[in-house]
Image: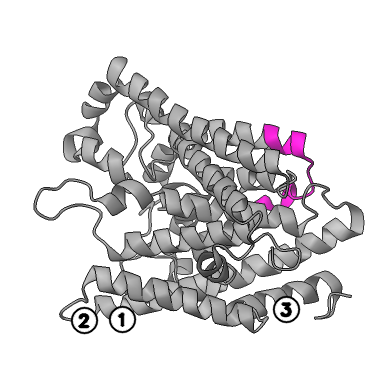
């Protein structure tokens, strides 16, 4: 902890940042064999889920931690979160205009903050019920609504990142952000709710930290085993091969790395899939489980030595700035006739991100975009930058 700050949470956010950077820089499939790469198998889907779960933890800590605020204090917190969400969404819209292959998460991130507002005043038991129900039922709702959106909205999915131009097609923007895009907010709200549940725990206590690791591992492994049983032993995968997408896509390989963009219609067996970015109950459970385990490990490692993971926690304390810079850098490198070597690009990016984070930490300062969001949030909450 730096002061009263849980550096383990920042370290987990830093791991999420580096994991997303890895999926943006390294190929997810081997160009020669078509097999999934190590980066695709380890980080795809899990890093962005960790980012969202930690966001939920952050919202819980902002609103009182294990003792959620009520009344005027809660109203002030909600105003601050709403302004924070707006700024993050605006940054996402600006980055969305860049020419890049990265699926930028920030606009969806801002929308998720707004969707989480009704839940930030809830106590732990009620939140746990909502999180469990949302994880189970939101994919079912999405499965039922997506075919209707495909028929009613043309096109039903943006072919690029959300940008200012996207507002010229409000129906498509609505469908993409909530149900059909790379980060469908209806299902992804599950991550923020689970993060809120975790953030309502007494995170500084050893049993809670150990419990997060154990529960996360059980949830992640259980989701994969159940998916394997349903798809292989019960014949679900054979049924999926008979759907339109099963005839078009190499589902076996895509289930290892990324199912975003695959039309999941024609069979209820899609809900038994646990592949990254499939948005099914088992995918959400698996990735939320890995996120909880990572958070628990980071809290344990920084329990006695708060600065043990300083390169990660320092970078994790200013991810909005570092993520934005990373997206811009990738847009520049992607435009080069000869792209840089991925290994060098990743490690240079990681070292620079850690170095910038440590420098700002030593100066006792926030990152530039973090300063803007914090200041605007304080103004919305208290009417002054001092928070009084």
Q: Reading the chain from its start, which is encountered first: label 2 or label 3?
A: 2
- Judged from the image, the secondary structure of the residue bearing numbered disc 3 is helix
Disc 2 to disc 3, how far (Cα)?
A: 37 Å
Quadrant location, the C terminus: bottom right
- Residue 26 visible somewhere in the drawing: yes
- Residue 97 visible somewhere in the drawing: no
Q: Where is residue 375 in the image (x, y as percent from the top left)?
A: 72, 78
Find residue 336 and name its label. Answer: 2
Disc 1 to disc 2, how far (Cα)?
A: 7 Å
| Residue for point 32% across, 77% down | 331
Q: Residues within 10 Å of mark 2 (few under 14, many from 20)?
A: few
* Label 1 with label 2: CB-CB less than 8 Å: yes
Quadrant location, the N terminus: bottom right
User: Does the magenta portion include 295?
Assistant: no
Task: Determine which residue is flagged by label 1.
Answer: 332
Q: Vertically, is 67 above or below 124?
A: below
User: Does the magenta portion include 117?
Assistant: yes
Q: Vertically, is 229 above or below 223?
A: above
Task: Determine which residue is flagged by label 3.
Answer: 375
Which residues lie in the magenta part? Answer: 116-129
Q: Where is residue 311 in the image (x, y as percent from the top left)?
A: 51, 69
Seen from the viewer's position, the closer of residues 345 and 309 is 309
In the displayed structure image, the side of residue 218 where residue 147 appears, left or right: left
| Residue for point 16% across, 81% down | 337
């Amino acid at each position: 902890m730096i002061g009263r700050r849980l550096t383990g949470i920042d370290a987990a956010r830093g791991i999420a940042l580096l994991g997303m950077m890895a999926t943006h820089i390294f190929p997810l499939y081997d160009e020669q064999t078509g097999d999934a790469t190590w980066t695709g198998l380890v980080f795809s889907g899990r890093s962005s889920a960790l980012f969202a779960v930690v966001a939920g933890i952050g919202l819980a800590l902002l609103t009182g931690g294990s003792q959620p605020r009520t009344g005027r204090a809660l109203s002030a917190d909600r105003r601050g979160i709403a302004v924070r969400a707006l700024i993050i969404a605006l940054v996402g819209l600006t980055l969305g205009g860049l020419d890049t292959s990265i699926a930028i998460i920030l606009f969806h991130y801002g929308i998720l903050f707004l969707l989480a507002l009704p839940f930030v005043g809830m106590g732990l038991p009620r939140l746990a019920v909502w999180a469990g129900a949302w994880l189970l039922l939101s994919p079912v709702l999405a499965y039922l609504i997506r075919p209707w959106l495909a028929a009613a909205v043309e096109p039903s999915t943006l072919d690029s990142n959300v940008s200012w131009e996207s507002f010229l097609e409000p129906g498509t923007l609505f469908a993409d952000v909530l149900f059909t895009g790379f980060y469908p907010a209806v299902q992804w709200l599950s991550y923020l709710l689970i993060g809120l549940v975790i953030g309502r725990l007494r995170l500084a206590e050893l049993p809670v930290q150990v419990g997060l690791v154990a529960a996360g591992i059980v949830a992640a492994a259980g989701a994969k085993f159940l998916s394997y049983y349903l798809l292989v032993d019960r014949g679900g995968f054979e049924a999926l091969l008979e759907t339109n997408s099963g005839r078009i896509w190499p589902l076996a390989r895509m289930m290892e790395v990324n199912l975003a963009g695959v039309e999941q219609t024609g069979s209820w067996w899609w809900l038994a899939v646990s592949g990254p970015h499939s948005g099914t109950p088992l995918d959400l459970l698996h990735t939320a489980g890995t996120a909880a385990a990572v958070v628990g490990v980071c809290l344990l490692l920084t329990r006695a030595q708060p600065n043990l993971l300083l390169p990660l926690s320092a970078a994790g304390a200013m991810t909005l700035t570092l993520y934005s810079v990373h997206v811009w850098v990738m847009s520049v490198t992607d435009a080069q006739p000869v792209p840089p070597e991925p290994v060098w690009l990743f490690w240079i990016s990681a070292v620079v991100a850690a170095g910038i984070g440590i420098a700002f930490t030593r100066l006792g300062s926030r990152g530039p975009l973090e300063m803007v969001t914090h200041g605007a949030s304080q103004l919305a909450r208290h009417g002054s930058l001092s928070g009084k």
